[in-house]
Amino acid sequence: MTNYKDKTFHIISNTHWDREWRYPFQRNRQMLVDMIDKVLEILESNPEYRAFHLDSQSIVVKDYLEIKPHKENLIRKFVQEKRLFIGPCYVLPEQFQVGGENLIRNLLIGHKLSKKYGRVSKIGYSPFSWGQISQLPQIYKEFGIELIMFYRGVNSLDSPKAEFLWIGADGTEAIASRFSTMPRYNFYFYIYRPVVHNEFPFDIEYKWSKGGVPFHFADKLLVDEDYFIVEPVDGYYPENIEKQVKAIIQDQVNDFTTPHIIWMEGHDSSGPNEKTVRIIKDIKKVFPELNVVHSTLEDYAKALFESVDVNSLKKVYGERRSAQFDRRSGNLYGYTTSARMYLKQKNFEAERWIQFYAEPFNVFSALVGRDINDNYTELAWDLIVQNSAHDSIGGCSLDEVHEDMMYRYKHAIEISKGVFERAIKFISKNINLKVFETGSSLSSSANSIFLIAFNPTQFVRNEVAECFIDIPKEFDTGNLVVEDSQGNKIPFQMISVKPVQPVLEQMIDRPMYFDMIRYHCLLQLNAIPSFGYKAFSVKTIEKSNVIIQKSKNPKSKNNIIENEYLKVKINANGTFNILNKTTGIEYKNLGYFYDEGESGHAWVNIPTKPFITTLKSKPQIKLIESNELLSKVMIKHKLNIPANLSERKKKNPKTKVLGIDLTLTLKSNSKILEMNIEVDNESESHRLRIMYPTGLNADYHFSEGQFDVVKRDVKRIDSKDWIEQPMYDFPLNHFMDVSDNKNGFAVIVDGLREYEVKDDKQRTIAITLFRGFEYIIQPSSKQDYTFQKGSQCLGKSNYRLAVYPHKGDWQIGEVYKEALNFNNPLSLVQTGKSNGTLPVENSFIKIYPEDLIFSSLKKSEDEDGFVLRVYNPTEKNIEGRIELMKEIKKVEQVTLEEVFINEISLIDKNSFNVSLGAKKIGTYKLKFT
């Protein structure tokens, strides 16, 4: 063997611990407790065992100490001594299926918890996400993390060597490693298993005759549980050392650009083994010239940085979603973007409530005097981030796991709604509503009724809002008007009227009720201030010819609805054409549905015939609402879909009806066409998408992701020789966009996470609604969970999205504004007359220009102020300004970790300037007088 005396081989003892995947959390935790017990036992009894890594997460320590709190001091001791490594993350996240702020909170919670138990391991060890977001270098750098280690999304064509220079969206450079063959478990398969078990990479059957003490339930209740070895064989096979060390060196040593080679010992749910120390000693006996050390990721990173020639490293840019080219890189396995789409939708809903409603308005209420010294928002984020673990949000686990997730989301949303409610209750009672002059039966202070519109976005809003106004029965005169503080009447459209008796809660009395008449109506609300509110008065008037809208058949065979900006024609097959009146461009045959069979699994899509569309459908089309403020059309499709995967293989398959109800809503003065899709699915193993042929001559498409709008190529590459084929379905967050620079077409989604732009003449956009698949996994033998139906997405589901034809690209078209306003509707509250000091309309915070995008407003981690985060998703530098309602005492620019950078001078007592380069994230700590 070649002399490698100049090399250092770093053996890293670690685990890859999925908090929940093959087992639900509580069942899996019992295995975790056994594993950490063993870690502590070895670290305590064997000083030669260098260290153990808990897979760059810290939640496992919390999970462990909830069961064994008496072990906390021992945990802290080994963490401080750098023998047990935890963090920097809270959980091991999937990066593309959650929002950017979610990823920041993951690191903040992970850092806080790790510090509590001793210290934070500042290594960007991220081999678990199915691809890596474009802003990860910037995010990690702002947490003081310099080395990034991953393999999903980068292949040996991107980087011929293990180490490369990764340049993020904003230009942040980070030294990164893709490992080598068998990336995160190379030592485990090459050396550990052959030496300890006489087992090689593809040995997966355990012979009963091998020995040990197997254990398995033999009763009806638990027969499906796994086998366990409760007393393992005390084996050791040093005769395998020479061959296996030569093999790993031959396969991998030339992949590395420095003398430092990394050998990872961990595997899924693996634990420590004292024999690692013996293996290292015996390797040195066989190869005395080799410098083999029991190392840590921190020691490896230090040695790497001291020896790497940065200038010689291959530069790799932006997001990483490359498929596997050869054995020297890992697979992407990226189709979890559409696995159990309902999880992605619920995560989006939970993030919306905490990020845009609860947290900022909680802070706003504090600015006007409310005590928010509590942990409600922290608890909500904790629950949401728990669900961000890759096998959780990825939708690739057992039904029980995802049922637990929905429970966490439910609690997070309940907490966030409650926080938002308490905040705007406090704000509402502090508004001075005495300035309104009423002139109706509601004229006295006790009888006054007001409506307050709260805006959870940074944009001034002008839009139609659906509203429910309750008039006490004793005041009701059969009709009402809504006015602003200047006495201007608000455009109003009645939908329905009915009597209600809502419950009244108050702490100092028993529950009572109001006897009310509820007016369901539409209001054209204008100039609602950014991150603020505007109050209106409600007055009763004498009953006139109130028009209650009812469903009716379209009078025109062309089925046309239109407003100031758009003209929409519904075609006989259920597709529709949109004319953008501003540009004169018409988009035709939009909104047909495409269904294909799915013979893949959670991680891989394998389209299977027959492929079925609604292009030849004859749906029911009905105009269900039409007035000055809004028009709605219902399009009802029924498709016959093969019942399951086995039926698809038959000449005459058994079919079931797939019901699709598409509702198109066009509001007055709106630039977007809103869509609500209700699906009733009884068939298994298929993917349903909605298609939009744009007709735009575009070479690229864009999608909003995590603090970035990512540019992607439409063209396909020649990859016939690759181990894994590239994935042309991409992730998105709020929107995606196709543009030929003159005109653009955006699709705005509410929680959907997967889209494709076809390389066809029409540049057809495909948005995945759901993908059902058989849940079969193979940890060793094939485990058939097809009896669990959660992955099939059966039953009724709902999808909310919008399309937006616009001028220019996504930036000129102000797609962010339309997307954030669509996904964060105005919140309307009814109140009596309050006698506070706040004005009748008010903005708590203004962000200039609108190209700077709000991410969060929160309590600071040190509880000594508040933290505002904005980002620049454009490719140009932005000089901006932040203006606040309350007088500012001090502003500091801080890192994402909230470490001080510098103090920022104030423009005046309420505002300060911000300067953000292209794709930069800005975080500011605010203190108020």
Image: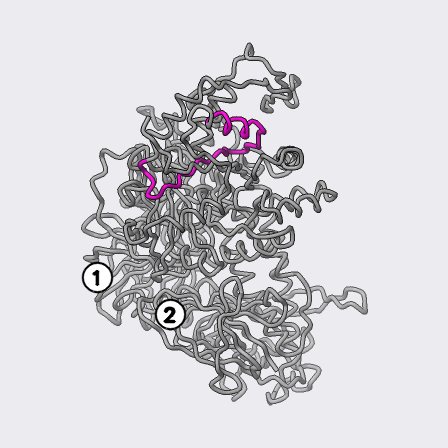
Residue in the foreground of this view, choosing between 519 and 907: 907
Colour mode of the rendering: one colour
Q: Identity of the amino acid at label 1? A: Asp
910 on left or right of 721? right
Residue 810: image quadrant is bottom left
Label 2 sits on residue? 670
Instruction: Give the extent of the magenta segment.
Output: 254-283
Q: Identity of the amino acid at label 2? A: Ser
Residue 603: image quadrant is top left
118 on left or right of 100? right
* Quadrant location of the N terminus in the rendered image: top left
Q: Residue furthest right?
A: 509
Residue 124 among those drawn in magenta = no
User: For the residues marked 2 and 1, what is the alpha-carbon distance in whole angstroms?
Assistant: 23 Å
Q: Earlier in the sequence, mark 2 or mark 1?
A: 2
Label 1 sits on residue? 740
Name above or below for residue 447 compared with residue 824. below
In the rendered image, residue 10, in percent from the top left (x then y), is placed at 45, 38
In what element is the residue under mark 2? loop
* Quadrant location of the C terminus in the rendered image: bottom right
525 on left or right of 429? left
